[in-house]
Image (tube, grey):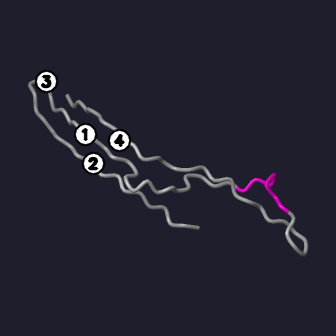
C-alpha cells in the first residue's frame, strides 16, 4: 500500500477592527493531485477463489480529497 501524502498550503491575513479580529484565508488542498485512499474496507462480497483453495478478498477503496481551493473568513469578537 502506498503512503498517504498530501500538500495543503494556506495563506492567511489577520485584520483588527473595532468589533474584533477577522482572519481571511485561502487553502489549496491536495495541490499535488495525488490519489490517496481515504477509507479501505475488505467486504466478503469481493472474495475471489484463490488458486489452490481459499479466497482472495479485494479491498473497496474510497478516494480522498480531490484538488480544490477553499476561501474563508473567521470572525473573533
* Residue depicted at x 49% and y 61%: 4
Residue 44 falls within the magenta-colored stretch = yes
Q: Residue beneath label 2, please? A: 10
The magenta stretch is 42-48
User: Outermost residue toward the bottom?
Assistant: 52
Q: Residue beneath label 3, please? A: 19
State the SS at label 4. strand
Q: Position of residue 58 (x, y in %)?
A: 74, 60
Q: Position of residue 29 (x, y in %)?
A: 38, 48
Question: Earlier along the polypeptide chain: callout 1 or callout 3?
Answer: 3
Are there few (<14), some (14-19), or many (20+) residues within 10 Å of tag 2? few
Image quadrant assignment for residue 50: bottom right
Q: Nearer the viewer, residue 46 or 33?
A: 33
Question: Earlier along the polypeptide chain: callout 3 or callout 2?
Answer: 2
Mark 4 vs mark 3, CA separation in Å: 29 Å
Is residue 28 depicted above or below 4 in this figure? above
Q: Is residue 53 left or right of residue 60?
A: right
Are there few (<14), some (14-19), or many (20+) residues within 10 Å of tag 1? some
Mark 4 vs mark 2, CA separation in Å: 10 Å
State the SS at label 1. strand
Q: Residue beneath label 4, please? A: 69
Is residue 4 depicted above or below 16 in this figure? below
Q: Position of residue 9 (x, y in %)?
A: 30, 52
Question: Earlier along the polypeptide chain: callout 4 or callout 3?
Answer: 3
Question: Earlier along the polypeptide chain: callout 1 or callout 2?
Answer: 2
Q: Quadrant of the N terminus?
A: bottom right
- Front position among marks 4 and 1: 4
* Residue depicted at x 87% and y 69%: 54
Amino acid at each position: 500500500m502506498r503512503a498517504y501524502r498530501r500538500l495543503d498550503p494556506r495563506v492567511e491575513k489577520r485584520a483588527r477592527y473595532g468589533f474584533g479580529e477577522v482572519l481571511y484565508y485561502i487553502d489549496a488542498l491536495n495541490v499535488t493531485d495525488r490519489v490517496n485512499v481515504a477509507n479501505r474496507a475488505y467486504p466478503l462480497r469481493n472474495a475471489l477463489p484463490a488458486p489452490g483453495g481459499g479466497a482472495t478478498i479485494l479491498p473497496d477503496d474510497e478516494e480522498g480529497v480531490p484538488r480544490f481551493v477553499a476561501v474563508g473568513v473567521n470572525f473573533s469578537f
